[in-house]
Image: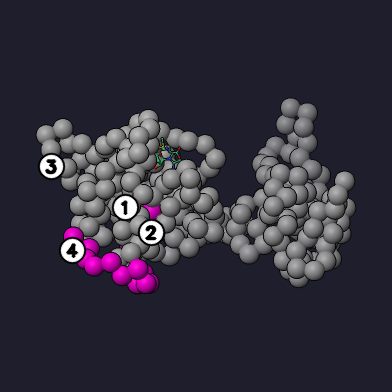
Amino acid sequence: MDIDIVSVFPEYFDVLNLSLLGKAQERGLLAVRSHNLRQWTHDVHQSVDDTPVGGGAGMVMKPEVWAECLDELLGIPADAPANAHAAPAADSPVLIFPNPSAPLFTQQDATALSHAEHLVFGCGRYEGYDARIPQYYRERGVDVREYSIGDYVLNGGEVAVSVMLEAITRLLPGFMGNADSIVEESYTGENALLEHNQYTKPASWRGIDVPPVLISGDHGRVNRFRRDEALEKTSRLRPDLIARLDCHALDKQDRKTLMSLGWEVSGEHPRKLED
Ligand SMILES: C[S@@+](CC[C@H](N)C(=O)[O-])C[C@H]1O[C@@H](n2cnc3c(N)ncnc32)[C@H](O)[C@@H]1O
């Protein structure tokens, strides 16, 4: 996978050379290139921002500078005509802008993007980037995504890009030593739940014992215990995930557990009964 990141602080991404991401690059699984947006400016101050049209506080990232940069990275001629109906080609680069006022980035998005061959990330700063930038590239057939990583505002897109990049690249085949560990995780799969609690040895630590069933050696009971714990935890912390489960994919014990947690399990999806 090829990854280009554009930022006014490209050195921020030096950390990507560490840990599993660094090892994956050494093994040729992915190539990450970070670029300084100012490289595409022409004025002496290397300006990338200007005051907001319509007034208001702060500065907005200029479309001209971004366009020179993105034309080059995406391989699009500067005079490419708009074709509002053009569907992105399957192997074309995906352009991603972090943006707090965009839909939330999820594990499903990470999974879909892990199949792309080329990702280009644009890090916003200041009050954000001119809204015509994503519009322009969408109209030229580019698959443009805008994502928020959560309901809070960061200073810039660099942290958000690091978050998305890590979530995406760890799903690449061969990235993780133990592929099973990514199959069984929170938010993963069709009927995603939060993961059950994890424990390691010793079985008793500072007066707190691990749940006895986990050292019973009975795999059936261990699996059932973990599944019930995942259902209980998800019901308590993320009832929206329970409400999206497919009832037809739940076994008899799943249904019993959910009913004991106050869910009606019939029809397409579980429904929380009023307390
Ligand atoms: C200070 S923020 C701009 C906030 C914007 N004026 C607003 O109120 O929605 C600057 C940049 O940081 C990034 N950013 C900040 N918070 C983010 C979040 N929760 N998710 C994704 N990107 C974020 C975006 O790239 C954004 O353009």
- Give the Cα separation between the discs numbered 3 and 4: 19 Å
- State the count of labels: 4
- Give the Cα separation between the discs numbered 2 and 1: 10 Å
The magenta stretch spans residue 274: no
Which one is earlier in the sequence, the residue at label 4 or at label 2?
Answer: 4
Estimate how packed mark 4 is, as few (under 14), some (14 to 19) or many (20 or more) residues with alpha carbons within 10 Å: few
Which one is earlier in the sequence, the residue at label 3 or at label 2?
Answer: 3
Q: Which residues are magenta?
A: 76-96
Q: Position of residue 19 (x, y in %)?
A: 41, 43
Quarter for ligand 1?
top left
Q: Position of residue 130 (x, y in %)?
A: 33, 46
Q: Nearer the viewer, mark 4 or mark 2?
A: 4
Q: Which mark, by number, is residue 42? A: 3
Q: Residue at x 37, y 72 (%)?
A: 85
The magenta stretch spans residue 81: yes
| Element type at mark 1 | helix
Q: Look at the numbered disc 4 and say if its residue's Cβ is closer than 8 Å to ligand 1.
A: no
Residue that numbered label 2 is attached to? 144
| Element type at mark 2 | strand
Q: Residue at x 47, y 43 (%)?
A: 100
Q: Which mark, by number, is residue 203? A: none
Residue that numbered label 4 is attached to? 79
